Structure formats: structure tokens, C-alpha cells
Amino acid sequence: MADATSHLYAIGIGSNRRHIRHGRPTGVVSEAIARLDGDYGLFEASPILINPAMGGAGRDFANAVAIVESPLAPEEMLAALKAMEVEFGRRPGKRWGERVLDLDILAWDGGKYRSPSLTIPHPALRERRFALIPLANIAPNWRPAGGPSFRQLAAHLTRARPTKIEIGG
């Protein structure tokens, strides 16, 4: 577990564009996990999943989640992750466009955090299967900001919706 001067962060990792050195998106995500391991204390990383792109982002995404330990405060962690994206070749573009590497802070052990540039837990986390399913696999009992556990959130998201049946005429 993290000591008093460090924090645990759940980092969402995604790619849907080739990289000249790391190859296909799965290779990019693998290399990003290795880089997080080298730069921070890697506690766990999920398997890499292939998911459909959202919002017209083009090709399918390779996604994973890593839990890392870092002494950085949330804004510093965000800046470090954005710098890593640029190092991997990410360029500014449309919001839902293709990207070599996308890194998001999904949760941290400090509870809720809000600033003009960052909200933790990630505001769309409850709707993102590609983040919740891996989180439920590697940190099932973690309760982001004291709410439901990742296992409970994933179960709620994957639960089949009941079909409304009307009988009679």
C-alpha cells in the first residue's frame, strides 16, 4: 500500500493509432504500462482489451488500466501523464479523434478531487465499460471516493436491463 507521502492512482490507458516504434495500439498500450512501471511503482495492470471507438474516433481502441503509486499530487500527475502522451506522439486534435496514446486518471486514493482541469473520480467512469471492467478485475474492492466498489459499479453497468412486456390488449 502507498505510504503517507505517496498516492495510488488508477490510470486508464488507450490507443487506436499505430506508433512508429511500438507498432499497433496493443503494443503502444503495453509500452505505456512498461513506462508507468518504470516511472512509478506499478501495483497491477489489467489485460489489454480491444473496444469499439467512441464518438467517431475511428478505429477500435486497445485499452487497459494500471494502478500506480506516485508521490505526485493530482495536478502534477496529470501534467506528467500529458507529457508522456506527447512523448508517445500524441498531437492536439479533435476531442474524439484517433490518438497514439490517451492516459486518464480514473481514481486515486485521496477521494474526490476537483479543479478547473481535473475531476477525480473521472466524470464518465460509471459509463465506461472499457475502464470499469479492467478496474473490477484488478481492484474489485476499491471504493473510489468512498462510493460503490469497482466490482459493484461494473456489475451495475453490465447487468442486463429488464425487458418491459405488456400483456393484454
Image: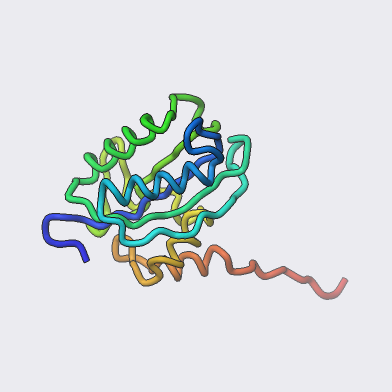
Front-most of 139 and 122?
Answer: 139
Q: Judge from the rendering whether residue 2 lies leftward or rightward of residue 52; answer left or right.
A: left
Q: Position of residue 69 (x, y in %)?
A: 24, 55
Locate the N terminus and report the quarter of the image it occupies: bottom left
Q: Judge from the rendering whether residue 154 lies leftward or rightward of residue 59; answer left or right.
A: left
Q: Position of residue 112 (x, y in %)?
A: 27, 54
Q: Position of residue 7 (x, y in %)?
A: 21, 56
Residue at position x 32%, y 39% in the image: 81
What coloring was used for the rendering? rainbow
Residue 70 visible in the snapshot: yes
Locate the C terminus and report the quarter of the image it occupies: bottom right
The quadrant holding residue 80 is top left
Count of marks, rendered view: 0
Q: Is residue 51 above or below residue 28?
A: below
Residue 96 visible in the snapshot: no
Front-most of 131 and 123?
Answer: 131
Residue at position x 26%, y 40% in the image: 115
Residue lying furthest top: 92
